[in-house]
């Protein structure tokens, strides 16, 4: 009489592929630690998470490191019931998870005639007879798994960067809208388009690209060519500029200290002509105008920081607050070769936050294109004079710097 043989499970092409990998003759030389790291990196890309990942972690932890050598087979023998206890799930859930790992090309079934899993070892610890779950497919694919993990991480980073760009663009558009309203420009159409794009069900990369294009349109609307540039005819006098001193020179001569001492605000009020000696002919020692305060109210430190990548990198700082900007003003002053009296004059006229913002923008432009501004200190003083008369549009310069940074990154 013929004996009926019952199968353990219904096979699929993916299961057969895993069995083929497990039976390969050219065994890949690797280690347990290397395969475990590869699996950890590739698991999200392979859809292995939750209980399945928990079971994978337990199974690979139960294998012995010496069993991953070329002469041996990385087997693990544990029952589904015991695994179910470990992960606090049902046996059927464990069965489905193991099946998923097999079809993912990580495990292969190495069944005994009865389906029971067990391992018998010799006196030297080598497996003499064993049946259970075989990690040979993962060992054979270790390089492929590393590549899968790296590609997944790279794709994730691209999407993450796109989402950051979306948030950045939306903030810039909101800032542009506020500036346009302040200057009486019609920004309603761009506002509407930005809301439509923000709420659209689009790929993050496409959404970021659409918003960046919208930012360019808004920048053009707000006259991005408006810069605080001064011609040679209107450039301020170089009196008091620092010449021939290195940025790293923190020990100036005593004579320079005496000639370039800071000008006190009280002295300015008593001697208005003192400003003329510092080439700010139109500046007066008056309280900070309300217009300057409004300019700072419309400017956040995050906007300013996004416009100063080169300066922050050069000084090794990250601007998170106005206090951070205040702390680097002295470095910025040295960076553009501005005399202490020239800086003190600007602070007296505009206040330190507003003067510091202009100083930082000047330094950034010098860092990006040193040939474009022949005399940075004179450029800074011209900007201060324009700010004092209400003719400086610092927001536009900042938007232009941010936009040019975005183009360089793209």
Image (cartoon, helix red, strand yellow):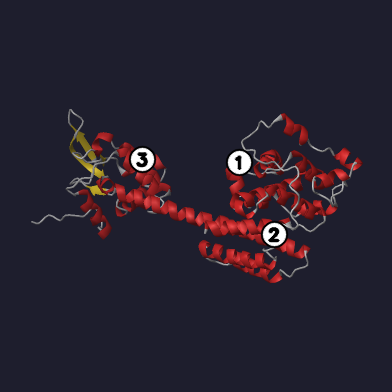
Q: Which mark is residue 315?
A: 1
- Tag shown at residue 299: none
Dot 2, how many residues are within 10 Å of its Cα: few (below 14), some (14-19), or many (20+)? some
From what the image shows, is residue 293 above or below residue 256?
Answer: below
Q: Residue furthest bottom?
A: 189
Residue 253 horizontal/vertical position (percent): 69, 31
From the top left corner, tell me how far across and down residue 298 is, in percent.
Answer: 75, 55
Of residues 256 and 175, the one nearer the viewer is 256
Left or right: 118 as drawn, with respect to 55: left
**Mark 3 Cα within 10 Å, few/some/many (few <14, many 20+)?**
some
Q: Which residue is mark 2?
A: 227
Question: Are circles 3 and 2 on residues that touch, CB within 8 Å?
Answer: no
Badge 3 is on which residue? 58
- Decide which of tag 1 and tag 3 comes sooner along the chain: 3
Q: Secondary structure at mark 3?
A: helix
Please state if 20 lies on the left or on the right of 245 as rendered.
left
Q: Is residue 61 left or right of residue 21?
A: right
Extreme residue in the left direction: 1
Identify the element where label 1 is drawn.
Answer: helix
Residue in front for this viewpoint, 406 or 28: 406
* Residue lying at 65% horizontally and 48% vertically, measured from the top left: 363
Q: Of callouts 3 and 2, which one flags the residue occurring earlier in the amino acid sequence?
A: 3
Residue 14 occupies which quadrant of the picture?
A: bottom left
Mark yes or no: residue 98 visible: no
- Is residue 175 shown to the viewer in this render? yes
Q: Nearer the viewer, residue 96 or 65?
A: 65
């Amino acid at each position: 009489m013929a004996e009926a043989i019952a199968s353990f499970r219904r096979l699929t092409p993916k299961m057969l592929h895993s069995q083929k990998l497990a039976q390969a003759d050219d065994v890949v030389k690797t280690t347990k630690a290397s395969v475990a790291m590869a699996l950890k990196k590739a698991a999200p890309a392979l859809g292995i998470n939750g209980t399945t990942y928990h079971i994978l972690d337990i199974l690979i932890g139960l294998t012995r490191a010496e069993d991953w050598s070329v002469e041996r087979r990385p087997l693990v023998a544990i029952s589904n019931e015991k695994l179910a206890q470990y992960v606090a799930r049902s046996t059927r859930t464990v069965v489905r998870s193991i099946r998923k790992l097999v079809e993912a090309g990580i495990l292969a079934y190495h069944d005994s005639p009865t389906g029971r899993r067990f391992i018998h070892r010799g006196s030297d610890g080598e497996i003499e007879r064993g049946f259970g779950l075989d990690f040979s497919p993962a060992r054979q694919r270790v390089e492929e798994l590393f590549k899968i993990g790296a590609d997944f991480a790279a794709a994730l980073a691209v999407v993450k960067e796109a989402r950051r760009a979306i948030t950045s663009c939306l903030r810039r558009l909101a800032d542009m809208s506020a500036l346009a309203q302040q200057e009486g420009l019609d920004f309603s159409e761009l506002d509407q388009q930005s809301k439509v794009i923000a709420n659209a069900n689009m790929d993050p990369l496409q959404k970021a690209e659409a918003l960046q294009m919208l930012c360019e349109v808004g920048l053009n609307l707000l006259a991005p060519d408006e810069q605080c540039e001064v011609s040679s005819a209107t450039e301020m006098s170089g009196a008091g500029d620092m010449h021939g001193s290195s940025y790293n020179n923190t020990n100036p001569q005593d004579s320079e200290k005496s000639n370039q001492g800071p000008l006190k605000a009280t002295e300015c009020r008593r001697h208005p002509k003192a400003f003329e000696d510092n080439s700010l002919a139109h500046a007066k020692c008056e309280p900070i105008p309300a217009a300057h305060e409004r300019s700072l109210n419309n400017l956040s430190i995050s906007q300013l920081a996004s416009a100063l990548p080169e300066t922050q990198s050069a000084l090794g700082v990250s601007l998170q607050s106005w206090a951070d900007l205040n702390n680097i003003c002295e470095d910025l002053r040295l960076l553009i070769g501005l005399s202490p009296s020239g800086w003190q004059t600007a602070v007296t006229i505009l206040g330190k936050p507003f003067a510091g913002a202009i100083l930082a923008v000047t330094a950034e432009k010098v860092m990006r294109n040193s040939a474009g501004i022949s005399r940075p200190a004179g450029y800074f003083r011209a900007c201060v004079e324009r700010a004092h008369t209400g003719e400086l549009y610092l927001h536009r310069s900042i938007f232009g710097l941010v936009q040019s940074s975005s183009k360089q990154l793209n």
